Image (cartoon, coloured by chain):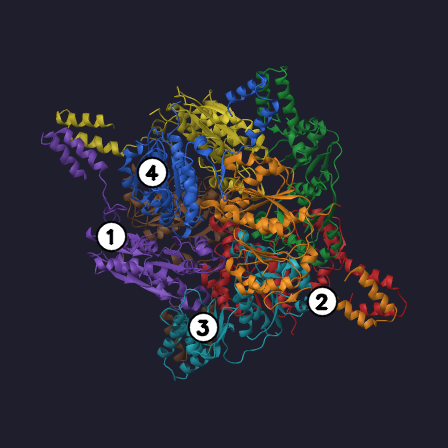
Chain colours: A orange, B green, C cyan, D red, E purple, F brown, G blue, H yellow
Amino acid sequence: MTRAELAALLGEVRAGVLTPEFAQERLLQYLRQAPFEDLGFARVDHHRALRQGRPEVVFGPGKTPDQIAAIAERLVAAGQSLLVTRTDRQAYEAVAARLTTAKFHELARSITLALGELPPGRGTITVAAAGTADLPVAEEAAVSAELMGNVVDRLYDVGVAGLHRLLAEHGRLTAARVIIAVAGMEGALPSVIGGLVGVPVIAVPTSVGYGASFGGVTALMAMLNSCASGVSVVNIDNGFGAGSIASLINHLPSA
Amino acid sequence: MTRAELAALLGEVRAGVLTPEFAQERLLQYLRQAPFEDLGFARVDHHRALRQGRPEVVFGPGKTPDQIAAIAERLVAAGQSLLVTRTDRQAYEAVAARLTTAKFHELARSITLALGELPPGRGTITVAAAGTADLPVAEEAAVSAELMGNVVDRLYDVGVAGLHRLLAEHGRLTAARVIIAVAGMEGALPSVIGGLVGVPVIAVPTSVGYGASFGGVTALMAMLNSCASGVSVVNIDNGFGAGSIASLINHLPSA
Amino acid sequence: MTRAELAALLGEVRAGVLTPEFAQERLLQYLRQAPFEDLGFARVDHHRALRQGRPEVVFGPGKTPDQIAAIAERLVAAGQSLLVTRTDRQAYEAVAARLTTAKFHELARSITLALGELPPGRGTITVAAAGTADLPVAEEAAVSAELMGNVVDRLYDVGVAGLHRLLAEHGRLTAARVIIAVAGMEGALPSVIGGLVGVPVIAVPTSVGYGASFGGVTALMAMLNSCASGVSVVNIDNGFGAGSIASLINHLPSA
Amino acid sequence: MTRAELAALLGEVRAGVLTPEFAQERLLQYLRQAPFEDLGFARVDHHRALRQGRPEVVFGPGKTPDQIAAIAERLVAAGQSLLVTRTDRQAYEAVAARLTTAKFHELARSITLALGELPPGRGTITVAAAGTADLPVAEEAAVSAELMGNVVDRLYDVGVAGLHRLLAEHGRLTAARVIIAVAGMEGALPSVIGGLVGVPVIAVPTSVGYGASFGGVTALMAMLNSCASGVSVVNIDNGFGAGSIASLINHLPSA
Amino acid sequence: MTRAELAALLGEVRAGVLTPEFAQERLLQYLRQAPFEDLGFARVDHHRALRQGRPEVVFGPGKTPDQIAAIAERLVAAGQSLLVTRTDRQAYEAVAARLTTAKFHELARSITLALGELPPGRGTITVAAAGTADLPVAEEAAVSAELMGNVVDRLYDVGVAGLHRLLAEHGRLTAARVIIAVAGMEGALPSVIGGLVGVPVIAVPTSVGYGASFGGVTALMAMLNSCASGVSVVNIDNGFGAGSIASLINHLPSA
Amino acid sequence: MTRAELAALLGEVRAGVLTPEFAQERLLQYLRQAPFEDLGFARVDHHRALRQGRPEVVFGPGKTPDQIAAIAERLVAAGQSLLVTRTDRQAYEAVAARLTTAKFHELARSITLALGELPPGRGTITVAAAGTADLPVAEEAAVSAELMGNVVDRLYDVGVAGLHRLLAEHGRLTAARVIIAVAGMEGALPSVIGGLVGVPVIAVPTSVGYGASFGGVTALMAMLNSCASGVSVVNIDNGFGAGSIASLINHLPSA
Amino acid sequence: MTRAELAALLGEVRAGVLTPEFAQERLLQYLRQAPFEDLGFARVDHHRALRQGRPEVVFGPGKTPDQIAAIAERLVAAGQSLLVTRTDRQAYEAVAARLTTAKFHELARSITLALGELPPGRGTITVAAAGTADLPVAEEAAVSAELMGNVVDRLYDVGVAGLHRLLAEHGRLTAARVIIAVAGMEGALPSVIGGLVGVPVIAVPTSVGYGASFGGVTALMAMLNSCASGVSVVNIDNGFGAGSIASLINHLPSA
Amino acid sequence: MTRAELAALLGEVRAGVLTPEFAQERLLQYLRQAPFEDLGFARVDHHRALRQGRPEVVFGPGKTPDQIAAIAERLVAAGQSLLVTRTDRQAYEAVAARLTTAKFHELARSITLALGELPPGRGTITVAAAGTADLPVAEEAAVSAELMGNVVDRLYDVGVAGLHRLLAEHGRLTAARVIIAVAGMEGALPSVIGGLVGVPVIAVPTSVGYGASFGGVTALMAMLNSCASGVSVVNIDNGFGAGSIASLINHLPSA
């Protein structure tokens, strides 16, 4: 209910068009009214797209292909773009049976279906990844950002132990508006990039590594302790989160 | 050395103005040349301000008031704005004895001295804090952001256990371009804010709490696991980092 | 042996009906007498139902379907209601072969069989859950509470990142006598609910999440650090424990 | 704004007494209106006492005696009872200079001032503590519960390594309506008590112990893993929280 | 080489029976001589049985049935008793094919084969276990102790949440010379037993439990923090270690 | 109340000497009767010395010198030997003012006062310590064991990095009946000793070390993982516990 | 581009052989030129062999046999030796189908193919392992070191609980130029070896053990806390890293 | 006793010069003979200098100035060089009162006194440090290495967030024979250096940082997970250990 709608409602009470009782009910109802739809096992939040300008993401693990397909269908029916993460080809096939234009991104382990015209981002989001094992997470970030209307530049296999690879791409780094830096093991990539550029760096630790990498905790902690001051961090393997934040930044209005 | 300078140099070699030996020396020297100045106990990086558009921050702990004053003087002499964090009145007095225009921010535990005209940020940075004990960190963020040329709106004592306080300020939240959300204990504030707005939220866990708060680790972990997707996180108590990232975002060119 | 039984025994000794030797044996035997029955691999505690007004719970993991069925049969033969948690359909079928009235709760992963009249709880126990992935734990709590004679109101998918969903059900929250709040990830739901109501909140962290959720430890720690003061916490995924405590509270006598 | 006030407001619009514009402003203002008062460094929440039937607690650490006294004075002026925890005699003296009827509880490290008639709890809250070193936390729980209108029975030094001490007081345990069990080290007391009684047990781990007690984490984890099913847990050393939850339970209406 | 053998050797040098060179070689050889036998993938230590009076234990995990059988055969051929732990029926069958008198202990997941006359222990070793899920570890302890010549009394399902079960067996506890107390979850059993008896208690945490039991770490930490002073602790699930230590104590000479 | 006392009581009821009511009271009273004395801030357990053959230990931290002296006086008045651990000279002086024969052990940070004839231990307890920094803990163990009537052999500065020092004392190790092995840092001493001897080894990790020693956790974990099978472990820095367990073992009857 | 090449380039500009524009391009290109080759999913770094004198290692986990074979073929085509770690026979067969001279090392779980003449190491690298379960890691170290041109002496099953086995090989230890010490459980081997020799010891913790070994963390922490001062540590199970470092040391020029 | 001495001894027995009894005693005595001297509170190991070519280090914390001075005097009297770490000026003054040539290194917090001619190292040891706060640890490493006869090149304030500072010194890095890389916070320096050079890198994490740096644990874990394969790690803040290992490597014979 917008401010205009409220004024109109009260005006109609004044005019005798509506009884006060009716208006009271209407107001109470609005406050109670849930801008979502009950699907039995999940309340699909149709307002988030409006409120936050991004698709409702469906997190794959723990859902059956059928559940994923049902949610997907409902979201698309409600006019929202679709993004399913941490999923697999089997779930994709269940989705594609209902939504033939859905796409599967093997490396990103994601399903997407873009609806409507997306407002384009202002600049490029660069996704930098340290090693080949970090690619699924990097691709999840890239695919998510693309679905939200961003141009993405992928800069892969630029880990700090071979610094020349990264330095050779200095130009691509400085051309970015936001950088997503994805790394496992010692998680040093965001620090090095953060020292080279003057734009926000979203660091994504990955669970890549073994022994004392503790499933990504070492990289996470290293990134939180980055000596470069432009770096903020998302959860381990959370490519979608990074893509989403980068897109938010990239879509901020010209103000 | 810009591309133009390189072209000029080589042209002068061609013209015989410079010998190849001289040019070789000049090139090697450039590669070796460190854009910083040695202060004995610290290399002051005069290029960072240029490279990254923000002041060199001086981290107070472990430095004597005299060391802080010496570094401060050198930075200001080099034309940079000054920001000392995690410091106290004693250090401030040492700095003020040399730099009379320096300011002390008691609650933020910071010393600042702004030099030159700063390009203004595009919108407002809102700093939200959950409780009174979070204020030193929130103020460090606010003071840092202000020093970098941003307008800051402070929204304090809006913890989630008294939700009406936060909801009452919904308008101020939606008016922000970037939000810094500061909280200790269970660290839920960024999740709630992230669900209400469509702009980037920088979450700052604080070491406030006791028992199983583990000096801020609980809040940190909660924020990393935020179910709201626009939230990225900085280190525990890292108000400066959050202010710096928010400023980076707020200063991105209109592109 | 009640105080009255003791008085009677001693009176009979005085009256010469019983010899002192017999009474001595009787007393020693009582002290030694184990109010349980040996099943080989488990001592079934038939007195707990009397002592504590709740069924003996059988924890499924690590027990074969046959072992579960044997324990179940013995408990029911002793007149106790049955609750098996963390179990599956295969175990249910073994139980149902012996106890045809047993029910299987798919989502709650539980088997129940109610015996006798249960004293009704005084009010409603509301089970609130943050996301769909928290439902197995929430259902375990709900089913447990129902088996113990409580009316349960289920309020699902009300996580804090979509605050309007929770606020829309404010009335159902305030109508509860006890609330069980189930959440994974950052575990903020109990804090928000605890700030809205004036009744006890039992918080149940779930192992839902990834990365730095650490199998529910993040949610657990966040809940222990709740800034809302009416919140107490049970172990990760311990739906049964929460249901049991809520029932205890809901069955306290009018005193 | 109650439902009745809303009806009245709308009726006055209908009657032409109020313009729709005025009513609109009034409604918007209500939504924005914060039921608290700004104290500069803290928003004092005067509604919590009404909403939740318990005093606003002031957590001492990190606040100066003067800040504590200022908050205390404001709360009492607003008609609320006062409870300051984790404080000391110095803060008490600052408070007492303004509020002469305030009391200091040395062992509980708390300041209290009771205002008005409190509705009495329905039964007794028993506070059991394992060792003498657990007493500050146990007393914080007891003092908090008493301030909220409860009768408290203190049962101290009943740790599990000397089981006869606890068993000797079996009668006092079974007479309780709620039990708060406070223990450090291995934290076994709540498990043993939980096995003996049929009422809710609130477990409070304390930071008592050394070596691998990890400042109370061992006791906390042990309590969360209690094999007795009536036990819920609060944060380490959180006596106030336990007292508050026990009081909530003890004040539930007869329904 | 005993002192007598050394005297004899030197005497023979003196007498000219042996050359100094020969004696030198003999001495050097003795120092180098390894009292074990190389099996390719393991050096079988035939001296440990002599040195320490207990069988060489073969730890099952990570070894194929064939490797286990090969080591077993070699140990028995060298006259040692055999104990294989954490093993399964498949490995047993491989062993039994070579050593027909080997026994399999299903619950203890162990293979044994006793050789020779064992000196009997001086008293009884009581193995107490909290729950049925602790039995595999308790049985490993019991079987290990029996193989080393001890009489074992099994006291199972006596967890602290049903204290009467344990107290009912007070006599069996006080009759023990050493007690092994096995528990998972909150690990309180050793504390309670340690408070009731005056003999050494070997505490064995088990990995039983879920959530914040952390695979036995909670029980381990609780046991290390036992407020009863006669309790020492072995590694999680280390039934063999506990049985071995108890046997050492039970076989100490009368001195 | 012994079996004989119970028989006598019942016989007197039979004979009419005692009324059943009196006997009932007597029996109920016995069950309630606490074999301890209330000191206000601590229940002094006078029965422990009888039950467990060792002095009541007073743990110093958190107690004032006066509290320590009061408890000490009461214990000695009750005929018990005294042991105060983790204490200092100031507390000693308070104790000595009341109990002139109390002794202070500077290095062990302990106060002792032996009362009565102690039954001698059967053999020698050897206390081995890795480095000089481990001596306070080692001495606490040694002093505790001596107070309980044991002969103690101190074998200090025998850490594994200088193996020859330990091997040079092989004879003293093999002469022991029980060995207490005290070490910080990597905590390897108990493993090496456990491989050399055939008697029980009580391992005591100390908080000696820095960096990743984590206040003794590394040593603790290493000791729990000892590859030598005769090793059990007590809490970090728990010299008293080790001395107490060693004494229990050394005083086991000849059976 | 060497200093000589730079001089030549500039000389040619001077001589008019090259235009300044050409030289400029050449210089810019050099800076941008990446000494690696893009393989789609991995940038193969052909310069590392030159820069660091060791083969590019291919870490097996998470790569399909086909991906491993493709990378292997490319590396060998570029003239580099091949080392694949943490792999299995299936991957080997895929590699061998393309590179028939590749070898599989079962125990080391590695594939190797040596190309060209390797400069021999200066001395022997001794790989010592505590137990049979440590052999896969020890063999990975040994195979890696051999592939890099070192002579390796394997000294296995010399854990500290059977100290005589290690002391019997004292000569082999002192003959080494570098020692790799591999151990799980309490990780004491490097400390003992470090105390016996005067050469660098590279400690490799393994994930061998159970309970509180925490997948090698205990051994890792113990090794970091080694009281022997010549010990440095690599990650858990990182045999390749240890072999690589040992080889670096063993190949240092005579200087 | 060397092989030659043994031959001589036996030859003298043969010749009748020595009796077999005398030789037997002599041999037994040798085996028992401890190559150290008892100082009451510490066994000073005079052989370590011989065995391992480095001074006995005295670790300052927990020792009084007098104890340090006493140990220092004894070591120097035995002809050993002296190194006291983690100490302060007060301890230095106590040492200097007895040993006038001792030197104090303020930044390194160390006392040294070099005795005799040290064999020079083969090359340069470069000590690189990330930030000024890392200097105490870096200096401890440098001073230690110098005392052991090495030439040290200090390369300070070259953290990865200002990569150009490090790259500007590429030449000094490649000129080193061993590199010690010291860093706190995210600990990325060793990875970057390890990727640039072909010599061994000893990584030293420091406790510099705050929040989730956990006293150096983050840096430690990051270094253990270094993606550069020439990096081994020592304990947090262990400058001495790093200097000692680097010296060992730098003094390996030309072989």
Residue hosting label 4: G127
Q: In 3D space, how far apart are the residues under numbered discs 2 and 1 (Cα atoms)?
A: 73 Å
Q: Residues within 10 Å of mark 1 (few under 14, many from 20)?
A: some
Label 4, label 3: how far apart the Cα atoms are = 54 Å
Do marks 4 and 2 share a subunit?
A: no
Q: Give the answer, above or below, for where A15 lies relative to E239.
A: below
Q: Which residue is mark 1?
A: E70
Q: Position of residue H126 (x, y in %)?
A: 48, 27
Question: Where is mark 2, residue-wise?
Answer: A32
Are discs 4 and 3 located on one and the same chain?
Answer: no
Cβ atoms at labels 2 and 1 below 8 Å apart:
no
Q: Which residue is mark 3?
A: C92
Mark 1, chain letter? E
Q: Chain of mark 3?
A: C
D245 to the left or right of H150: right
Q: Whole-Å distance between the Cαs marked 2 and 3?
A: 41 Å
Report crowding for label 4: few under 14, some 14 to 19, many 20 or more residues within 10 A (C-alpha): many
Q: Amino acid at mark 3?
A: Tyr
Specify the quadrant that holds the N terminus of chain H. top left
Q: In the rendering, which numbered label is found on residue G68?
A: none
Task: Output the chain of dot 2.
Answer: A
